[in-house]
Structure formats: structure tokens, C-alpha cells
Image (tube, rainbow, N blue to C red):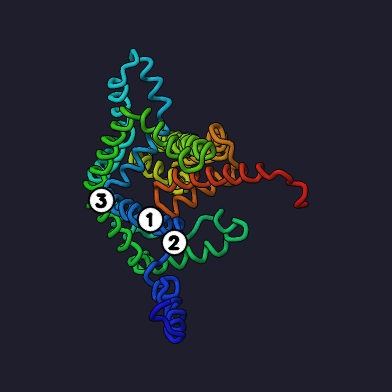
Amino acid sequence: MRGETPFSQDLTQVQGPLSAPAARPQDDFVKLPPAPAAQRDLVRTVLAVLFIGGMIATSFWILWPFLPATIWATTLVVATWPVMLRVQRRLWNRRPLAVAVMTLALLLVFVAPFWLAVATIAQNFDTLMGWGHAIVAFRLPATPPDWLAKLPLFGSQIVLLWRRVEASGIDEIAAKAAPYAGGAAGWFVGALSGFSITIVQLLLTLVIAAILYAGGDRAELMAERFGHRLAGVRGRESVRLAGQAIRSVALGVVVTALVQSIMTGVGLAAAGVPLATVLTAVTFMLCIAQIGPGLVLIPAVVWLYWSGQAGWGTALLVWSLAVLSIDNFVRPLLMRKSVHLPLVLLLAGVIGGLIAFGLVGVFLGPVVLAVAYTLLQAWLEEDPNPDEAL
């Protein structure tokens, strides 16, 4: 070939591979392979989770002032939903009439007693202050009764305490109790000052409950669909179980507390104990808090005996034993009527929920434990070979 020399052939052979596109190392950095689909999905998932989490947190932040009233309203509506359906059937299947009746019933059951209790305390405030002055000026008799020394175990110690108090008067005890009394008085004043806020929360609870009564069917369907979306059939069953647990606790705790407080009020009024209405309201709150009516009945019995009314004291003592015994068989029977859950877990949920979340925890605790216990049982029953683990 013309013009070609051995040198030019060698140069062509050397330049040929260098000029080829596949031989340029910089192309490995210019043409990067596309990102895998899994990596793109991971970034999108993380961003979506962050966005959804931020939306949920912001929503809770906005709704936080209404959250206690919403929880109470949901609890009341779920617990009384079967009653509302029966009322609706009796009112020609008119939902607005049933909603009005149920809202009025909640108003009479929850708001009116609370208002009556506070109004009674305010009206008898001078009487309570008079009791306080009478306690400070009180002096024990010089000699204790003979039967007091004959009491087993603690009789001699009570006689010594009697003589010490009689010698020094009530001033020493009042000085020791002054810090605690000051704290109790401050709490009482704070409770009275927050009475208006509590009334507003109760009224807001009634409004939300009326809305839930009106659209309870759609709310129930949405809750079941949400549970099914999360965990399939198990999620839907968990939502239904939560409703049964709320009704069970409402029957066991609230009904038992209502019966015990009514019986306590009847006994106190019949025995002539002052401020029976206020003590009945206090008894209801103590029963809701799982403390029981003993803190009201026992001092009332002691006061009757101390006032020389031994007959009424004995009668109230027998009545108090009956009231205290109701808690042992009525509440377990009612609580296990709607949900199959061990009684120990039900009571632990009531007491633990009360300690952890306050009064709302009386209902939240058993609901959480009931759902968790049922899911655990279902998970254990799905084991295909349970005998191999033994």
C-alpha cells in the first residue's frame, strides 16, 4: 500500500487500541449504571414514613386540647352503644330522637351529679370550717373507757395514746398535721378553681358523644376497616375485642361503683350522718378509683359510736359489710360477661391503667391488655407443631 511504512503500520497498531471507546478508562465514570429499584424504593419509603409521621404528630398536637374529651366520649359511646340501639328501636327507628335521649341521659348521669356535689360543698363550706374548729378545740375525757384496755394486741397502746393526747390536748397533733392539712387545703382550692374547666370538658365530651352517636355506624365500620388494613382478620377481631372490653369494664367498674355509692348514701342518710350527699359523691369517685367505700363508711360508723348512737352505729356497720362485699362478686361477674379474659388481667388493667393514665386509664388499661392477650393466644394457636417444643 502506497505511503505506508513499517513504522506507520506499527503506529496504527499502537494507536488503534488507544483510540477505541472501550479502552478509555474515563468512560467507567461517565456512564454510571442506573440505581437499583430497591434503592429507589428505600428512599421513597423513608421519606413517606417521615412525612406520615410528621402529619400524625402535627395532627395530635392540634387535637391535643380535645383529646381527653374525645377519649371519654368514645368510651361512653362504645359502652352505651347497645343501649342506644334499643332506644332507637323504641323511638320508631329515628336516630335523631335516640341521640337526643342518650345525650340527655349522659348529661343527667355525669354532669348533674358532679355539679350537685360541688354545689353542696360550697353551700356547706361554713359547716366544714366549723368542724375543723371543733376538732382543734376538742378534748378527750380524762379516763378512757374500760373496754378499750381489754382490746387484744393494741389495747394498752391505744390507752397510752389516749392519755398522752388528753394531757397535751389536740394542739400537738394539730401542729404535726398542719403541713398535711395545708397541702390538702391547697388541693381543695385548686380543685374548686378548676371546676369551670372540668365543666367545659364534660360539656365538650357530651357534644363529641352526640356526634359519635349520630355517626356511630360509619365510625365502627371505619375502625374495623383500619384494623383489617393493619393486620387482616386479626386486626378486625382486635377492634371488636376492644369494644367488648370497654363495655365489660363499664359494666364491672361503673355499675358496681354506682350501686355501692347509692347504697352508701342510703345508709348514711338513714343513720343521720351529716352531708350524706357529699359523702355519696366522694364514695362514687373512690369506687371508680378502685379504693372502695371503706374510707367513707368506717369513719361514719366510728362517728356514730362516738356520738352515743350505738344502735345506728351497729346498723350502719352491718350495712357497710354488705356494701363492701358487693365488690367481691358483682364486679367480676359483670366484667367477665362480655369478654373472656382472666380476672387477674382485668383487675390489673383497671388498677394499672388508673395509675398510668389517670381516670381514663380505668378503661384504657383493660382494653390494651385484652387485645394483647387475645393476639398472644391467637399467635400461639397458629404454631403448626406445638408438641415439638416440649
Q: Specify the quadrant of the image occupied by residue 333.
A: top right
- Tell me which residue sits at (23%, 45%) in the image: 122
Position in image of residue 336 (x %, y %): 56, 35
Q: Identity of the amino acid at label 2? A: Ala
Q: Identity of the amino acid at label 3? A: Ile
Read off the residue under disc 1.
44
Q: Is residue 114 above or below residue 15?
A: above
- Tell me which residue sits at (34%, 52%) in the image: 52
Number of marks in the image?
A: 3
Q: Is residue 352 above or below residue 219?
A: below
Q: Residues within 10 Å of mark 3 (few under 14, many from 20)?
A: few
| Precedes in sequence: disc 2 or disc 3 | 3
Instruction: Report the disc number at residue 253.
Output: none
The kind of secondary structure element at disc 1 is: helix
Instruction: Report the disc number at residue 142.
Output: 2
Read off the residue under disc 3.
62
The kind of secondary structure element at disc 2 is: loop
